[in-house]
Amino acid sequence: MRRSRHYLVTGGAGFVGSHAVAALLDRGDEVVVLDSLRTGHRGAVLPGARLVVGDLDDEVLVGALLAERRWDAVLHFAALSLVGESMREPYRYIAANVGSGVRLIAACVAHGVRRFVLSSTAALFGNAGDAPIDEDAPIDPGSPYGESKAMLERTLLWAERVHGLHSAALRYFNAAGADPAGRLGEDHVPETHLIPLVIDAALGRRPALSVFGTDYATPDGTCIRDYVHVTDLAEAHLRVLDLLDAGSVRYNLGNGRGHSVREVIGAVERVTGRRVPWHAAPRRAGDPPVLVAAAWRIMRETGWQPRFADLDAIVATALAWREGHPEGYRGVDGSIIPTGGAPRSRRGSRSTRG
Ligand code: UDP
């Protein structure tokens, strides 16, 4: 029988992190989540995992967790993660993501951790053109968010050269959808991501969607992204963890198919059977016109294949979560607030999406 493995997961209460934790638990591994809960949710950490509420800046806490046992790997999801916000607050993004990430990498090396997985991003590729982007494309971030992840990828190269730390950098394109078993979903406060916003507009829970830019050089004038199901991303983590003994890897993760903002609106209209109210709005700073992954390398080297490659299937799981959890994790994360009760108050904006 396979030995159960032990993983420390930062940001495991966030969107991608919580789905990766679920995948680890589902295969019988033991997981400790370190999350500040500034943007993550207690209810997003499934009962099989141990949640430690704390900050990555707390070096004593991080050191104590790393010293607790011999970890099979550390998975690092916790980060500020909004492209648009990073264009307004570049220094905060770079200082927070690079500072906390470098300290964590150093602490891992000091405590004998041999394997590290970094949540990275398609935002490494700011001006890649229209063609699907593979791992040989030049790294040229279009935003401070992307820059912060590029710096961490570079740091990991040095951690390997100098200290032998093996790492995976997984560049997620647009993480979307929700756990098909209905346990987890997407809940950002405030929500800025396209698919949940379009669904809420369709359900009449929000006013009309603002489409950021309708004059891009794309067939319908709106930005094109590669939406990849969060459960498929989680599965990719399992596959790379099993490879890390052999060395370090960098993978682009997407379906290899781009969908414009208007196509996403069309998919939500098909899946919900409702019209989505929307209006044209100015471009959002930092948004490249097209980001589509060429994910052949991870497919070839690990056998990874997306199970939810179809946009309507991705939207359907996101819709099921929104319909089943109209208040998101509120009410399932221990802070039960009756419908119509006080709005959730959140400070800071550390996010755990990749
Ligand atoms: N977008 C939009 N209106 C919104 C939110 C997003 O038009 O209210 C667009 C955004 O400009 C981008 C795409 O939808 O082209 C995906 O944005 P999202 O924030 O979901 O992900 P990102 O690509 O920034 O990671």
Image (spheres, rainbow, N blue to C red):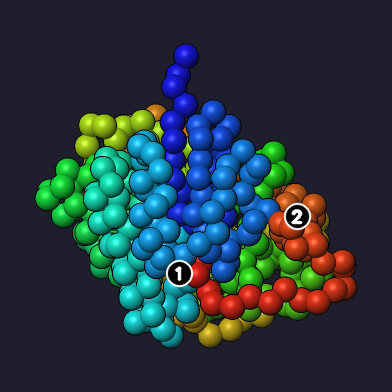
> CB at mark 1 closer than 8 A to ligand 1?
no
Residue on which disc 2 sits: 332
The image shows residue 56, relative to residue 251, as above or below, that is below
| Residue 182 location, quadrant | top right
User: Please, what secondary structure does the residue beneath circle 2 have?
Assistant: loop
Please state if 37 lies on the left or on the right of 333 as rendered. Answer: left
Q: Position of residue 115 (x, y in %)?
A: 30, 41
Q: Residue at x 58, y 63 (%)?
A: 37
| Residue 149 location, quadrant | bottom left
Q: Which of the pair 191/242 is nearer the observer? A: 242
- N-term mark: 2 or 1: 1
Q: Position of residue 168 (x, y in %)?
A: 31, 45
Q: Residue at x 41, y 65 (%)?
A: 58
The image shows residue 146, relative to residue 306, as above or below, that is below
Residue on which disc 1 sits: 80
Q: Residue at x 54, y 28 (%)?
A: 28
Q: Position of residue 339 (x, y in %)?
A: 87, 67
What whole-number distance in Å separates the C-alpha atoms at marks 2 and 1? Answer: 24 Å
The amino acid at mark 1 is Leu
